[in-house]
Amino acid sequence: MAEVKPSSTPPPPATQASTEPLYAGFTRFELELEFVQSLGNAFYLNHLASQHLLQDPAFVSYLDYLQYFTTQEFVSYLDYPGPTLKALELLQQERFRQDILSPEVAVALANTWAEESKRT
């Protein structure tokens, strides 16, 4: 797989006057927001691991790039910041990227996040 390096700066949130190119009708920011929010699903993380994406250096680099969602400017766009931000943090650890391949780990993580969401 050819290494694709994302831009080093995050895209601005879309505005009506934006001249940013659209991809299937969506801005890059909207696509990245949708993707990063999907990381808050432990079973999706398990799926990514089963497809060997979490072992791909280019994909891991992209996950690092998505850390911009942890900044105050962008965290407000997240619907479920708790699990999303925790997933971004965990995905930076090689051990977690290996462990999430286990369905038992995915179930335990999903249960933990569900319990935490009940408390908030």
Image: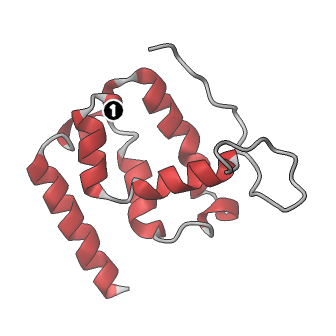
> In the image, 57: left or right of 106?
right
Res 112 → quadrant: bottom left
**Vertical order, 12 against 120 (above or below):** above
Residue occupying the point 64% across, 45% down: 24
> In the image, 43: left or right of 62?
left
**Vertical order, 107 against 49 (above or below):** below
Whether residue 16 is visible: yes
Res 43 → quadrant: bottom left
Q: Amino acid at mark 1?
A: Leu
Residue 98 lies, in percent from the top left, at 22, 35
Image quadrant containing the N terminus:
top left
Residue 65 lies, in percent from the top left, at 57, 38
In the displayed orientation, state which residue is furthest to the top.
2
Residue occupying the point 38% across, 85% down: 120
In the displayed orientation, state which residue is furthest to the right.
17
Residue occupying the point 65% across, 60% down: 74
Whether residue 97 is visible: no
**Vertical order, 76 against 9 (above or below):** below
Element type at marker 1? helix
Color encoding of the figure: secondary structure
> In the image, 59: left or right of 66?
left
Residue occupying the point 77% across, 52% down: 12
Q: Badge 1: how crowded within 10 Å, few (<14), some, or many (20+)?
A: many
In the displayed orientation, state which residue is furthest to the left.
104
Which residue is denoted by mark 1 in the rendering? 54
In the displayed orientation, state which residue is furthest to the front.
24
Residue 89 lies, in percent from the top left, at 42, 50
Tag count? 1
**Closest to the observer: 28 or 94?**
28
Residue 22 lies, in percent from the top left, at 73, 44
